[in-house]
Amino acid sequence: MKSQSIYSSLLLCILTFSHFLTIAAERCVDFPDPLNLSKQVIVDCPPTANKDVYVKRQTTNFFEVTHNCSATAALCNNIKEAFNDAGKEISKVLKLKQIIKVNATFTDLFDPTLLGAAGSARYLPLTSDDKIIRLYPQPLVKQFSLSVHPEYDDYDIIAFFNTGVDWWFKTDNETIGSDQHDFYLIILHKLIHGLGFISSWSNLLETVVDQDITGLTPIPDFGVSTSIDYTSQLNESVSVETSFDTNLEFITQVKSSSQWEIAESAFISATTNDSSGINHVSEKHYDLTPNFLMTWSQASGETLEYAIQRGGNYSSPIGPRILSILESIGY
């Protein structure tokens, strides 16, 4: 993968920003569980007058976090402080206009290898000036300050973090252990995902019908078309607003369409771990750069400060190319 290919990969299904946006439909998609992105709920979201007011740019933290913490009081306080620091850091580098509400739960996820997860609570359908309907993450839509918008969920980002992990906090005032993870680093990484740094590409269609595949890696060898063109063709496999009684019925129609030949060409051997290829940047190319934050693996025994130094002492843990991607989707 060339270093520039991060953009073609991430911008495949991360949303393209336009200055002219209108409501495309009154049904939105909720993702109540960032640990299980296959769990999607279609909800009514009627047009709603915007009651938000611009928040002064002097505000140092645009993130309002509701904490659900089942740990000790001392640990919960460390968590709140880390979230506060993360909110300030993101608020410093992004030109946010509206408060972003986060519902954060710190509980046992019963898997010591699972650090946590975060995602946008709701995706809202908007039409831009190119007449294409796209699903925009709620925290991003709020920054557009539309006079009328699809009804928002109570929270913009939902996050879970694992009490079963040996966390390290900078307030510990001791060297990080080899098996510990820097909680502040992980929060930053997950909140960036919650802002919309994510892709809808996955292998869920195939796994639903118990067909084992090696991976889904869009645009493997297509030198004459863009990711958007490729996605648009796939979207034609089923007519808009078609209803299906079962998921299997939907899969059958997709596979019987002429577009399925296009889809099959994407099922090649994956070069990264499951679900990491498009949702993250290349570890090979970016781990030792200022853009390390959004690589797939965050090693234990390493603090955020160490990662910044190793990457060249950039002024923020959120590197310039990560910021460029966030800017490209509308922040």
Image (cartoon, helix red, strand yellow):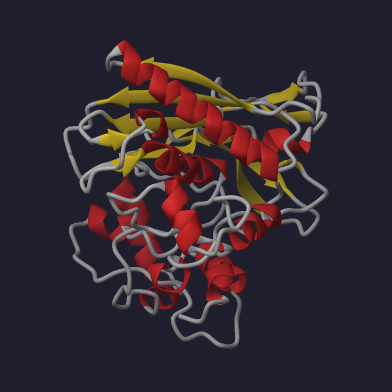
Assign the N terminus to one quadrant of the image. Answer: bottom left
**Which one is in front, 206 or 215?**
215
The answer to whether any part of residue 233 appears in the image is no
Q: Report the number of numbered marks.
A: 0
Residue in view at x 40 percent, y 67 percent? 283
Side of 148 where 220 appears, left or right: left
x, y percent for residue 290: 54, 61
Q: Residue furthest top?
A: 73
Q: Residue furthest front?
A: 174
Side of 289 where 160 appears, left or right: left
x, y percent for residue 231: 54, 67
- Up the image or down, 128 lies above or below 234; here it is above
- Up the image or down, 326 lies above or below 172; here it is below
**Which one is in front, 128 or 70?**
70
Residue in view at x 80 percent, y 21 percent? 53
Residue in view at x 66 percent, y 51 percent? 133
x, y percent for residue 117: 37, 39
**Which one is in front, 172 or 212?**
172
Residue in view at x 63 percent, y 42 percent? 125
**Which one is in front, 256 or 310?**
310
Side of 258 where 299 appears, left or right: left
- Up the image or down, 59 lies above or below 310; here it is above
The answer to whether any part of residue 264 appears in the image is yes
